[in-house]
Amino acid sequence: MTTFDTFMSQLKETNATLDFFTNFKKVSSNVSKVSMKLNQLNFLLGRDDLRAAIKMLYAENPKVFSVLDILIAVRQRDKKQVLNENLEPVLLESYLNNEESVIKFIEGTGLADVFRSREIKNLVDYVFGVEVGLDTNARKNRSGDQMANAVASYFKSVYIPFEREINSTELPGLEVLGKDKKRFDFVIKTASKVFLIETNFYNSGGSKLNEVARSYSDIAPKINSISGYEFVWITDGKGWLKAKNKLEEAYSIIPRVYNLTTIADFALEVKSLM
């Protein structure tokens, strides 16, 4: 098995692949949900008498203004607050409830200048760009998924069959884990052994890394004590440099700890058991 020092030297800066940066399916879906209203708001673009145009559109369909918040890269579910003219905190969405407030919103946010400028030709295209920008905020959450997806892609490339996100209750003989349900990222079944696999990737340090290492150090011996089962931990990322001691402790307790470099060694052994 790879020495711990070698393992640490192999940790990667990133686990991002090309599909990490923007989830275009999600972006398109979000835009599609508001596209009809955005197309109606296009009526305001290039209007010199913007106030009159807003009043005309509001009389026709006041509901179209419910999507104005996305034009300033805010989602209503975020429940953003702003100070009104009396310096009182109010919900941003409260400006979308009547005609005069809508006009205040458009003027106060600067959207009025954007609408009058004629630089924006289509609000659907504009919001597509806004959604791409907002989606970058989800990259932190995608990092964990990206690790699991990278591992899944690797298993597929070497023709190792697997199951994903399997609860411990679906597997016989795991009563040793107690009443708490445990969901494993991957389960690989061979003729003689079932591997229960957890994956993660950490770009930065923090208390979570210590908690994860401690948790897996506790669960691995329990699983490994059950005939036919073995716990596997595939982890990577430079964040471990700031939690090296706890990882080293776990490395000494858990027989099977791999990173994105040594996963190939694990794959070779799995294939030999099939």
Image (spheres, rainbow, N blue to C red):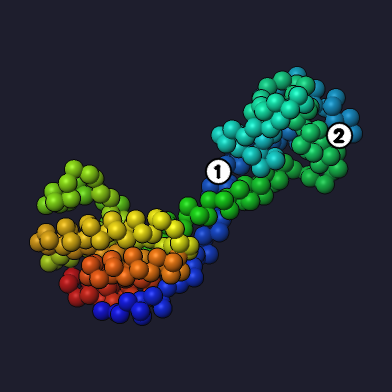
Q: Residues within 10 Å of mark 2 (few under 14, many from 20)?
A: some
Task: Give the answer, above or below, for where 88 lies relative to 212.
Answer: above
Where is residue 40 drawn, in percent x and y?
Answer: 72, 32
Q: Looking at the picture, how far across and down is residue 212, in whole percent?
A: 33, 57
Q: Is residue 135 left or right of residue 5?
A: right
* Left or right: where 71 falls relative to 143: right
- Whether residue 64 appears in this view of the structure is no
**Contact between labelled residues 2 and 1, with CB atoms less than 8 Å apart:** no
The 10 Å Cα crowd at callout 1, few under 14, some 14 to 19, many 20 or more, is few
Q: Residue at horizontal 24%, vertical 45%?
A: 181
The correct choice, above or below, for 67 with respect to 261 in the image is above
Residue type highlighted by circle 2: Arg
Q: Residue at x 36, y 80 (%)?
A: 6
Coordinates of residue 23 in the picture (x, y in percent): 54, 53
Q: How many marks?
A: 2
* Quadrant including the N terminus: bottom left
Which numbered disc covers residue 218? Answer: none
Q: Visible in this render: residue 8?
A: yes
Q: What whole-number distance in Å separates the C-alpha atoms at marks 1 and 2?
A: 29 Å
**In this view of the protein, which residue sits in the foreground, 228 or 89?**
89
In the image, what residue occupies the spot 48% across and 63% down?
203
Q: Which mark is residue 29?
A: 1
- Residue at image x 84%, y 43%? 118
Disc number for residue 47 = 2
- Image quarter of the C terminus: bottom left
Residue 7's spot in the image, x, y percent?
35, 76
- Amino acid carrying label 1: it is Ser
